[in-house]
Structures are given as structure tokens and as C-alpha cells.
Image (spheres, rainbow, N blue to C red):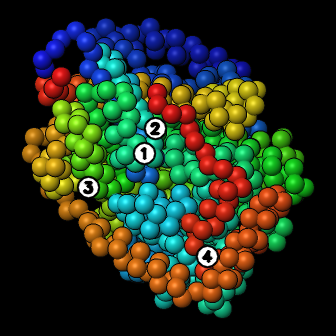
């Protein structure tokens, strides 16, 4: 990029600057910290110049190229936000399906184009709401869904063709695909006209978050069943069967490098299985990746840029992918909610705004940020509205959408992008050498690495080495008075009544037959999407379906006390 | 604190279905660094299994963590079962996402301290030392 003479001039100029201007300043005023590092601990230099890129052998055509083309560093689309502003989404849902339906309608009125259905824990873990293990949990962190009847109620009156529906079904991805498509079918809307997105990413649940049911191997199989079904039925342009998630690992304490490496390792575990079934990787479109947006602004931006380039490389080199739709990561952003503080919660509005800005500068496909009261409870309507307004201000007022990948070419941004890719590749290779993601989860490798990072972070905060506003500096005494959303205490009872009514009113012979067929198919090892559809149509409950699968596959039991 | 010399034994437990255990795990490590003997149950415990572990491990303190909002059910249930098993002296504390307004009734029901996110480990350790009965 620079001729030798110019590089020599830069070198001389830098030496001179170090010996004069910089030296005088350091002698007179010094710097307020002995070293400056990113949140992940990567050292950051005082000043970056073209020399930093030249030393790395960096060149424009190989490292950046043009948006929409390999290696995708600058973005997966050639026009990015000039083509259209990102869809804004909000994760929500609580109570019964009827309660959630009201919130979804409110959010659509406010301008959201995507409904992210938060499921309560019993649903995610495959228990019916009347299971004794679910006491106190029904409808709490998400909406309670026991059967197709609840999905129908949650989307009653909501135009299915205009919105994207997403959900956090991970252990039970194919079941939720069956629930959503059957709901559409009953309303006369074929799957080809819907836009569905199922998280379906079980491996990260063993590492963080914990909504697993079955052991890792059959879980990966069940998850890939949905992807295989989507690819073979040409549904890849309107059904997105994955979010490869690093988000929850970072929430559990993973550094940026760990998040990147473990997300890639998990993704490769599924995709290896997919191609081993003879599915053409190029029929797998819009690989969605969900990484948490670090509060460290530049590390966040560089992480997304680095991951985009790395993904394209892995798809090309490992799977011989050629389709730009497979090579280009579809980033589904998210703020990093564990940066939010319960103390002085209004400060989280600012953290949210920074995260939206970072996601937009990094060129994410959809953007999300947490509501300011997330650290206190389920967000209120008002704080959900504020999340949308934050995004709308960045999108329509700030002007950052005018050009694609505006930070490209910054010496610092490019150097850090390279550094993150290198470090993540190294850790990923380590996981692969020891047997891949499933082995690294079974041995506890990923979990212990993340815990170590979480503990180190805590120690830094407690020693004051890392400043968190409102936690270890700038605290205030008075208790906060933020309005908190309360979940109606009658939810559990109302949901159980609905469930009892369902069990009486449906054709129970048909339920038994379809469950038996599901079990048979699981034993046989065939693709389970079709038998799940049959059971869903008979109004079998999620708990009933998971119970027959538990009989075949067993349950995952992590090691006990430690 | 009556007896000195012997380390305080703590059980950190995750009642209910919530799998977010970063807090529970770092607290386990942190209290160990404070010189206590700490056992962590792992996620998805029932009040019954927690009390069984507390009895078996003969702990002085039971720390409960819940981020799913099910604390109003699980926390008092653990206290009730501990009493049934004759472990009245065990100090029960809790943490997670606990709304301010729930704290008075939890305290009334025997959860002696509630510590939200951002609480320094030292504060929790000091509270335990000051309130533990052995």
C-alpha cells in the first residue's frame, strides 16, 4: 500500500517523534495507567501507523476486498444500510400466550419487524407447565408454551407474512419449527411465506445458560435434523435454522477470543454433521451468528469484522463453500447485558446506545440491545420502547449508515481485527486437536476456561483495576426507583388450567399414536422433523414429546458437586 | 461467630430451572479465597436436593442463586425444609435478580441476606462471618 520510501519516512518521523514530542510529554505528565489493554487483555499501543499493518504483511485485496465478496470483511452485502436499515428486534415475552400476544402487538405498533419469542424455562427444558419441577418458573422469563394451542394464541391477530418470528428453542429446535409452521398452515399461510428463525444451538447450552435436556451427541443430531430438513426442502431463504451463539458464553464470562473460538468450534460440529449427511453446504444460507457486543467499543467492532472474515475462510477451506450466502455471516447482534448494572440503572441506556453504535459500525444484519432495567427484572413497555428509539436515533439521525464499513483502513482497527482472528484461530485449533466441540464440552474444557475468565474479571473489578461506573467508582447511596414489571402471580394457575382443558379436549388416541411414532423414529435414527410435525398437529404437548425422546436418548447430567 | 479455627462451610445452590450460574460459580471461588470451604451444587436443583446436600455436607451457610424470578417460591421452601430437618441454625442467604420489593418478605421468611449483582465478594464474606451460627 505504501512505497518503500514513504515507509522509511514514516519510520524516521516516528523515531523523531518518540525522542522529542512524546518524550517530553511522558516526562512532564506521564500516562494515568502503566498499560492499556482491551477488555480481553490484548495490549493496545499508544499510536498505530501504516507500519503496524506492513509488519503483519497486511494488504487490502486479501484482508478486506469489497463488501458482499470474499473474504466478506467489509460486510455481507454490497450496499449495507444504504440498501435498507437493519431490522430492529426486541427479545420479549412473559406470562401466558395471551399476555405475550398483547406485548407483541404493542412492539409491532412501535416499529419492530421481528418478534423474538422468549420462552419460559419449563418450555425450553421440555417440561409441561404442571410438572412439579416447574413450580415458580411458569411464564417467568418468557412465555409459557405447552402445545400448538399456546402458539396459536400468542400469534392471534398478528400478520405472519410481514414479520420474522424467532425463538430460543435450543434443545427442542425441530419441535418449534413444527409448532410455527403448523400454526401458519392452520391460518392458510404456507411456510414459504413465513420468516422463521430458530436458535437451535444446543452446544452452547452445556457451556452456559443450561437449557439442555439430552446428552450432547443426540442433541446435535436432533438439531441438525432441522437444518437438513430446511436445506433439502429449499427453505433456506425463509427459514433460518440456527443462531450460532457466542453471546451466552460471553455473558458467562468468556473473553472475546474465547467467544469467537468456541462459537466457531460449535458451528463446525453441526456443519460437519450436516455435510456428512450428504447435504450441499451451499444450500445452507444466511448463517446467523450471535456474538455479544463487548462494552470495549473497538474490540467489539473488530471482533465482528474478524469473525466475518474468519467464517468465510472456514466455509471455503473446510467445506469448499462457494455461495456468497453461505460464505457471508448474517450477524444477529446483541448487547452484552452482563455489562448492565443493577446500580443506577439509567446508566444502562448509555451502555445500550454505545452497543448499538458499535453493532452498526461493525455492519451487523440485525441489531438488538438490552433494556435498561434488564438487571432488575422483565423490562417494562416503556423501557422496550426506549430500546427501539435508541436504535432509531443511531439509524436515522447519526449519519453513520451513509457508507459501508466506515472504520476500514484505520491502522488500529485493522491491526486489532487481525490480532483477534489470529488468537481465536489458535484457540479453535486447540479445541479441534482435542476432539472438537463435543469433546471439549464433555471434558469441561470450555466451561473451565470461561469460569477462569469470569473470575479474573471479577478480581479486576474488585481490585479497582477495571472501572465499572456505579459498581466500583462513582457509586451513589440512594436506592434506585425504577419501575419494575411484575409478572402476574396467577400465570401458573391459568396456564395449568389451559393445559388440563387441552388434554381433555383433544383426540388422545391420535396423541398416543404420534408419540409412539416419534419414539420409533428416534430409535431408528431417522430425521425427526416429520414425526414432530405429526405430534404437534395432534396437539401433543412439548413435555410429552420430550418425554419419549428422554426414554430413547436419556438425560444429560453434568458432574455433581464441586 | 462462636468458634474460631475451623473454616466456615458453605453450600452454594441453584434452585429451579435457571441455568445462569456465573454468579454462583465466581462466588464459590471467591468465598474459597476468603478461606471458607465452599461446595457448589450445579444447576437445576430442587429445594429437596439442596437441603439433602446441606445436611449431608453439614454446612453452616446455604447461599441460593436465582435469576429466573422464581425466588419467591424456592428460597422460602429451602428455609422451611431446613427447619424440618433440624438445621435451624444454618444461615440462608440469596442472590440473583431479586426486585427490591421482594426483599422484606424474603427476609421475614428467614433469608437473612439478599445480595444483588455487583455486590463485592468481601461484603458477602463479612456478612457470613458476622451472622453465621456455629
| Residue corresponding to mark 3 | B72
Q: Tags 3 and 1 in contact by the CB under 8 Å rule?
A: no
Q: Secondary structure at mark 1?
A: loop
Residue A207, quarter of the rendered image: top right
Structural distance between the alpha carbons of marks 3 and 1: 15 Å
| Residue A111, image x, y percentages | 43, 76
| Residue corresponding to mark 2 | B42
Structural distance between the alpha carbons of marks 4 and 2: 31 Å
Q: Who is closer to the viewer here, A363 or B86? A: B86
Structural distance between the alpha carbons of marks 4 and 1: 27 Å
Label 2 CA crowd tier, 10 Å (few <14, some 14–19, many 20+):
some
Q: Which mark is residue A444?
A: none
Structural distance between the alpha carbons of marks 3 and 2: 20 Å
| Residue A70, image x, y percentages | 77, 48
Looking at the image, which residue is at 46% across and 79% down?
A500
| Residue corresponding to mark 1 | B45
Amino acid at each position: 500500500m505504501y512505497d518503500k520510501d514513504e515507509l522509511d519516512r514514516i519510520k524516521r518521523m516516528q523515531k523523531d517523534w518518540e525522542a522529542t514530542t512524546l518524550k517530553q510529554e511522558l516526562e512532564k505528565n506521564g500516562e494515568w495507567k502503566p498499560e492499556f489493554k482491551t477488555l480481553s487483555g490484548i495490549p493496545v499501543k499508544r499510536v498505530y501507523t501504516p507500519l503496524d499493518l506492513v509488519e503483519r504483511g497486511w494488504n487490502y485485496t486479501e484482508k478486506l476486498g469489497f463488501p458482499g465478496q470474499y473474504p466478506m470483511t467489509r460486510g455481507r452485502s454490497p450496499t449495507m444500510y444504504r440498501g435498507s436499515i437493519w431490522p430492529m428486534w426486541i427479545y420479549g415475552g412473559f406470562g401466558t400466550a395471551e399476555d405475550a400476544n398483547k406485548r407483541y402487538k404493542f412492539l409491532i405498533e412501535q416499529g419492530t419487524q421481528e418478534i423474538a419469542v422468549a420462552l419460559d424455562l419449563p418450555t425450553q427444558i421440555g417440561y409441561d407447565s404442571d410438572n412439579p419441577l416447574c413450580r415458580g418458573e411458569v411464564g417467568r422469563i418468557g412465555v409459557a408454551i405447552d402445545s400448538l394451542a399456546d402458539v396459536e394464541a400468542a400469534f392471534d391477530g398478528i400478520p405472519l407474512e410481514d414479520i420474522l418470528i424467532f425463538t430460543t428453542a435450543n434443545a427442542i429446535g425441530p419441535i418449534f419449527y413444527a409448532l410455527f409452521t403448523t400454526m401458519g398452515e392452520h391460518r392458510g399461510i404456507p411456510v414459504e411465506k413465513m420468516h422463521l428463525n430458530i436458535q437451535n444451538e444446543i452446544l452452547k447450552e452445556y457451556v452456559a445458560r443450561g437449557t439442555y435436556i439430552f446428552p450432547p451427541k443426540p442433541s446435535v443430531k436432533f438439531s441438525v435434523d432441522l437444518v437438513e430438513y430446511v436445506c433439502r426442502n429449499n427453505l433456506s431463504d425463509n427459514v433460518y435454522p440456527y443462531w450460532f451463539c457466542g453471546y451466552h458464553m460471553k455473558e458467562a464470562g468468556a473473553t472475546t477470543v474465547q467467544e469467537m473460538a468456541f462459537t466457531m468450534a460449535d458451528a463446525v460440529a453441526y456443519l460437519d454433521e450436516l455435510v456428512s449427511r450428504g447435504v450441499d453446504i451451499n444450500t445452507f444460507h444466511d448463517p446467523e451468528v450471535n456474538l455479544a457486543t463487548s462494552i470495549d467499543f473497538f474490540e467489539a467492532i473488530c471482533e465482528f469484522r474478524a469473525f466475518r472474515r474468519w467464517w468465510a475462510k472456514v466455509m471455503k477451506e473446510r467445506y469448499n463453500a462457494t455461495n456468497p450466502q453461505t460464505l457471508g455471516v448474517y450477524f444477529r447482534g446483541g448487547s452484552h447485558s452482563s455489562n448492565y448494572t443493577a446500580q443506577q440503572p439509567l446508566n444502562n441506556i448509555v451502555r445500550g446506545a454505545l452497543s448499538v453504535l458499535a453493532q452498526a459500525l461493525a455492519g451487523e444484519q440485525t441489531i438488538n440491545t438490552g433494556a435498561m432495567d434488564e438487571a432488575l427484572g422483565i423490562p417494562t413497555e416503556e423501557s422496550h420502547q426506549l430500546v427501539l428509539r435508541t436504535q432509531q436515533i443511531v439509524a436515522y439521525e447519526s449519519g453513520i449508515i451513509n457508507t459501508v464499513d466506515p472504520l476500514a483502513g484505520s491502522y488500529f482497527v485493522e491491526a486489532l481485527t487481525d490480532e483477534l482472528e489470529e488468537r481465536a484461530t489458535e484457540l479453535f485449533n486447540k479445541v479441534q486437536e482435542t476432539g472438537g466441540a463435543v469433546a471439549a464440552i464433555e471434558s469441561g474444557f470450555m466451561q473451565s476456561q470461561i469460569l477462569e475468565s469470569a473470575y479474573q474479571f471479577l478480581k479486576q473489578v474488585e481490585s479497582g483495576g477495571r472501572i465499572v461506573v456505579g459498581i466500583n467508582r462513582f457509586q451513589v447511596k440512594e436506592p434506585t426507583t425504577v419501575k419494575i414489571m411484575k409478572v402476574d402471580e396467577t400465570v401458573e394457575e391459568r396456564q395449568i388450567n389451559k393445559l388440563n382443558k387441552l388434554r381433555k379436549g383433544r383426540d388422545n388416541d391420535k396423541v398416543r399414536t404420534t408419540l409412539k411414532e416419534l419414539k420409533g423414529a428416534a430409535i431408528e435414527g431417522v430425521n425427526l422433523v416429520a414425526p414432530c410435525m405429526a405430534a404437534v398437529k395432534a396437539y401433543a404437548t412439548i413435555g410429552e414429546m420430550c418425554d419419549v425422546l428422554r426414554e430413547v436418548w436419556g438425560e444429560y447430567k453434568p458432574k455433581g458437586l464441586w | 461467630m462462636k468458634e474460631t479455627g475451623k473454616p466456615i462451610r458453605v453450600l452454594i445452590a441453584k434452585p429451579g430451572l435457571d441455568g445462569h450460574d456465573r454468579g454462583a460459580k465466581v462466588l464459590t471461588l471467591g468465598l474459597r479465597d476468603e478461606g471458607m470451604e465452599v461446595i457448589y451444587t450445579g444447576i437445576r436443583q430442587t429445594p429437596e436436593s439442596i437441603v439433602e446436600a446441606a445436611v449431608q455436607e453439614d454446612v453452616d451457610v446455604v447461599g441460593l442463586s436465582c435469576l429466573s424470578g422464581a425466588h419467591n417460591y424456592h428460597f422460602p421452601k429451602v428455609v422451611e425444609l431446613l427447619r424440618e430437618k433440624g438445621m435451624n441454625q444454618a444461615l440462608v442467604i440469596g442472590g440473583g435478580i431479586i426486585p427490591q420489593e421482594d426483599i422484606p418478605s424474603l427476609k421475614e421468611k428467614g433469608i437473612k441476606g439478599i445480595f444483588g449483582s455487583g455486590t463485592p465478594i468481601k461484603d458477602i464474606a463479612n456478612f457470613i462471618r458476622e451472622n453465621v451460627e456455629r
